[in-house]
């Protein structure tokens, strides 16, 4: 009986720790996936973007956001062109295709 009084609180503490530790990681993963999915739109990927990332904004040319009327800024994270992706590496021994 004396051992039960000691073991039961330790068991309950261990179970509570396990439940809360695992649950927190799942919520963070879901939040990260949601955030990454939200950053796939034109308002994040266009060459010129609104500083407020208004939904539906973004352009390949400088201009103003149709939603908040702020000036677009150059997107430093814009996808590099195919030519930029090929700079800085050797094109000589590519098997199966040529450049």
Image (spheres, rainbow, N blue to C red):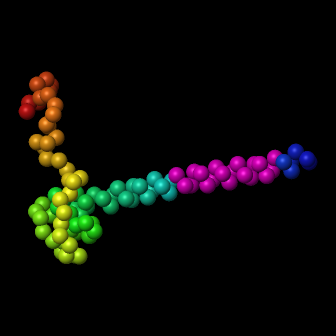
Name the spot of residue 92 as percent of width and height, x first: 11, 25
Q: Is residue 96 left or right of residue 19?
A: left
Front one among 43 and 18: 43
Residue at x-position 19% and y-position 76% = 69
Name the spot of residue 35 as percent of width and height, x first: 37, 59
Does the magenta stretch mainly form a helix, a strand or a loop? helix
The stretch drawn in magenta includes residue 13:
yes
Q: Quadrant of residue 38?
A: bottom left
Front one among 95 and 16: 16
Which residue is the extreme one toward the left?
99
Counting labels gives 0
Name the spot of residue 21 as percent of width and height, x first: 59, 51
Residue at x-position 55% and y-position 55% = 24
User: Is residue 81 in view?
Assistant: yes
Q: Quadrant of the C terminus?
A: top left
Residue at x-position 70% and y-position 48% = 14
Which residue is the extreme one toward the right?
1
The stretch drawn in magenta includes residue 67:
no
User: Is residue 58 in view?
Assistant: no
Name the spot of residue 94 as percent of width and height, x first: 14, 26
Residue at x-position 66% and y-position 51% = 17
Residues shaded magenta: 7-25
Q: Is residue 93 left or right of residue 31?
A: left
């Amino acid at each position: 009986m004396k051992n039960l009084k000691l073991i039961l609180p330790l068991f309950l503490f261990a179970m509570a720790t396990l439940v809360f530790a695992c649950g927190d990681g799942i919520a963070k993963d879901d939040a990260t996936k949601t955030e990454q999915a939200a950053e796939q739109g034109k308002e994040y990927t266009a060459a010129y973007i609104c500083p407020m990332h208004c939904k539906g904004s973004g352009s390949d040319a400088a201009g103003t956001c149709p939603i908040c009327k702020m000036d677009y800024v150059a997107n430093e994270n814009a996808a590099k062109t195919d030519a930029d992706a090929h700079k800085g590496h050797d094109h000589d021994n590519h098997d199966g295709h040529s450049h």
